[in-house]
Image (tube, coloured by chain):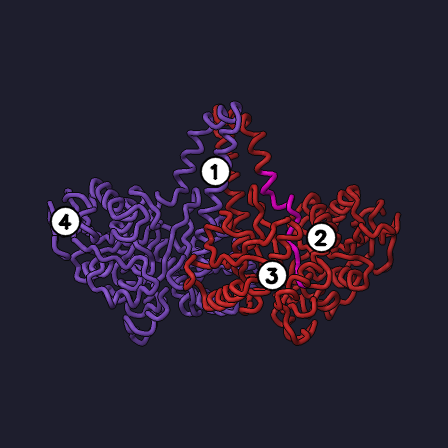
Chain colours: A red, B purple
Amino acid sequence: MASGASSSSSPARPSDPDVAVVAVDCNGADLGPAEVAAGAAIAAEQGARVILFGPAGELGGPRPGVEVVDAPVSIAKNRDPASAVRAYPDASIVQAARAVAGDRAQALVCAGGTGAALAAGLFNIKRIRGIYRPALAIPLPVPGRPVTLLDVGANAVVRREHLVQFAFMGAALSSTVLGVERPRVGLLSNGEEEGRGSPLVLEAHAELAQRTSASIDAFEFVGNVEGGDVMSGVADVVVTDGFTGNIALKLMEAVSQTILAAVRDAATSSTRGKLGGALLRGALGGFRAEIDPERQGGAYLLGLRRLGVVPHGRFSRTGFAQAILRAERGAREDIVGQTERALARAGALREAPVSASGASLRDIE
Amino acid sequence: MASGASSSSSPARPSDPDVAVVAVDCNGADLGPAEVAAGAAIAAEQGARVILFGPAGELGGPRPGVEVVDAPVSIAKNRDPASAVRAYPDASIVQAARAVAGDRAQALVCAGGTGAALAAGLFNIKRIRGIYRPALAIPLPVPGRPVTLLDVGANAVVRREHLVQFAFMGAALSSTVLGVERPRVGLLSNGEEEGRGSPLVLEAHAELAQRTSASIDAFEFVGNVEGGDVMSGVADVVVTDGFTGNIALKLMEAVSQTILAAVRDAATSSTRGKLGGALLRGALGGFRAEIDPERQGGAYLLGLRRLGVVPHGRFSRTGFAQAILRAERGAREDIVGQTERALARAGALREAPVSASGASLRDIE
């Protein structure tokens, strides 16, 4: 099959306007493109419409609801995604982003890394007018009350005004997707007192406090939040730079897994332990599923004119299916429009038009 | 009792040179000075010699091995510790630091916050010549293989050369205290690839890589370490700035507690769960104790001419006892001398003499 050729068992663009089509880049997943395709099949069974971009030979035959575009070129592991996006217009992520930009699909899922998704999205889908930087936002699976953490990795270096916009973007996600009314927004810092933090945090704190005192209705600013309070319920949205947020997210996942593994070890260390583990399995299994990153489906890429979702590259088909369903729902719920309107109402959009490429792309990692 | 007066049931300075005396600031603990004194009593029973600085009326009567200096003035909650240290020379932390500087004690324990300990230490104990910045280092209770994380909160803002020194300081602690030969040192970042990270991380990475290729023997530099790998065993020492490190540490503790609480909930949710929990209790209890921050005793304050240990303000007597024992052992093991020699051998000390006060104190938070 020639690159770019397309096969489908059903029209990808649904006649039903309530269903969004998701463009999926299959390259870059740890388990290979076939695993992503298997996830797409699961999502399609639940009603999603998908266009897969990847090596067609590895993606299986056409399935109901799943269109396949042969796009074997991968830039998922490229160290300089911004240049790679320019150099490889046939790359799967670039084709997927173009499909979204051209409205063949309404949301983007990229299994091949944040950098590639961000670069391809900025070039093709482009930023919402007035948004400085897209951000990756993840609803943390805190039992009972999800907490939205952003940025978890789109921007290793940010400025004050970026953090301020992230607060609005996170609040819009929290209210749209999680149904939190007037979310409480905190700023991640090394101390809860107002004067604690890096110079960047102090600047962002001052601006957010001032905006809150001007009675914005999009969210309530609750000040600094320490690492220990991310999951304590003091905030519905926790804002930070992509360097700190990425470290925090991966650390949380690793600590959870380490502790649960230790519990498992305890439950296999002796006959007594095995019996105890067996009796606890039902109750613990529910909790384990609740905090499983695969069940969440990955992070929302916010700030582009269409929604993106970035799953972990190490996900199995279960996680990719959730990512696709998350993207589909998010597109239908118009997260992008809600975010844009929230920022516009609050006067938090940048006034001068932002170039969609150029300067900001130098900062993509 | 007049401020500064001293009572003791035994000479605080031991004739035995193998026992170090620990000066303890009791002000600032969440549970009050009496809890710190109770911890000192436990540590003294295990052979430690302690001088307590705090409100004598709350510290109980003299005990074997425990001297009490009435120092009711507390600057533990002061927002500007550097100014407070100048303004309140009678403050308990200042008196405790002076006792260490004057060799009445050989190590400092401060229950009242990092900022006060750092400011009082810099003014009175002073930095090791050639050290840019003291750092807080904590051996993380990773089951089976402790990992030293630094800086966990002494410096919210650092420069490249600070991170490079932290690598040497952490490696010296790891080999001296934990017995790790030629520790593997990693740099905390938002990606393991060499090009990933903030500009600061990239700079520090380049210098550490260059030093490693020049075959330093103090440690092996293993490059960037992601949040998910802090506990995976790829590095014995993880270096970061005090902003990120503080967030990471508090997050790890909170996630551990949340997961263990969920396990406990599962084990009380039903008769079946209760029986399972009872059967698992022994095996899980050992693990819970192993990762309990109180059992660790807090963080090492490295870079001063004497060792400091900073426990959590929220510790109970158990944790304060461990902090005192940790300080006592660390002083006997000459962590300070080992650190200084490691940096000198590697040429990692700053060549021009460093002023002990002045510029650097502006950065204390």
Chain of the residue displaying label 4: B
- The amino acid type, in three-letter code, at marker 3 is Phe
- Tell which circle, 1 or 4, labels the residue nearer the N-terminal end: 4
- Dot 3: within a 10 Å radius of its alpha carbon, few (fewer than 14), some, or many (20 or more) residues? many
Element at label 1 = helix
Mark 3 — residue? A168
Chain of the residue displaying label 2: A
A261 displayed left or right of B83: right
- The amino acid type, in three-letter code, at marker 2 is Gly
A21 displayed left or right of B115: right
Mark 4 — residue? B16
Q: Quadrant of residue A4?
A: bottom right
Magenta region, residue range: A288-303
For discs 2 and 4, the disc positioned in front in the rendered view:
2
**CA–CA distance in space, label 3 to label 2:** 17 Å
What residue is drawn where x is 67% and y is 55%?
Answer: A310
- Dot 1: within a 10 Å radius of its alpha carbon, few (fewer than 14), some, or many (20 or more) residues? few
Residue A330's disc is 2
Circles 1 and 3 in contact, beta carbons < 8 Å: no
Residue A268: horizontal and vertical position, in percent? 51, 30
What residue is drawn where x is 79% and y is 41%?
Answer: A45
Are both tags, 2 and 1, on one chain? no
